[in-house]
Image (cartoon, rainbow, N blue to C red):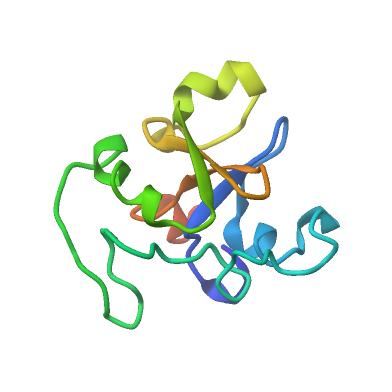
Amino acid sequence: MPKGGAEPRALFLFPDEPPQPDTEVCSGQYRDWLSGDPCPYSDAGRMPWPESGERERRPDGSGQQEGGPEGEAAHQEAEPGYPCVTARLGRLSDWRAERDLQFPEELGGRPLLKCKQMFLLVLATGWEGGRGGELR
């Protein structure tokens, strides 16, 4: 579980390493790749909430709650609203062998995204593993 018990908004993927939650990467703590400073596109060291078209309800109760199937279709319209996402690279499961990425199997149908810092990530919203599950 990420620091402070917060559920991850995104999981960042690196070759031959377990996924890292947004609390570690966006805050600049993970491997000191951002010189220890939070990402300038982050929301207080976290993956920012979408600017528009959001599909989830923020913890403060604001935002829209829309239904829809889980997986790629549920997130397809949401990620363009994220101010830090620059590209959608296809389904995560299609990249496993290409980049030797490690991730929980249940995330395989989600879109693989690239952020402005050139890191690969998947949105973790709605992922049950974020609720007490271990990142492997």
* Residue 19, quarter of the rendered image: top right
Q: Is residue 41 above or below residue 72?
A: below
Residue sitting at 38 percent across and 56 percent down?
A: 81
Q: Is residue 36 above or below residue 4?
A: above
The number of callouts visible is 0
Q: Is residue 45 visible?
A: yes
Instruction: Look at the image and tell me in which quarter the N terminus lies.
Output: bottom right
In percent of width and height, residue 13 lies at 62, 40
Q: Is residue 135 visible?
A: no
Residue sitting at 42 percent across and 31 percent down?
A: 108
Residue sitting at 47 percent across and 65 percent down?
A: 7
Residues 6 and 43: in front is 43
In this picture, residue 66 sits left or right of residue 2: left
* Residue 100, quarter of the rendered image: top right
- View extreme (top): residue: 97
Residues 11 and 40: in front is 40
- View extreme (bottom): residue: 60
Instruction: Look at the image and tell me in which quarter the C terminus lies.
Output: top right
In this picture, residue 83 sits left or right of residue 26: left
Q: Is residue 114 above or below residue 60?
A: above
Residue sitting at 39 percent across and 36 percent down?
A: 110
In this picture, residue 95 sits left or right of residue 20: left
In percent of width and height, residue 84 lies at 54, 55
In this picture, residue 47 sits left or right of residue 19: left
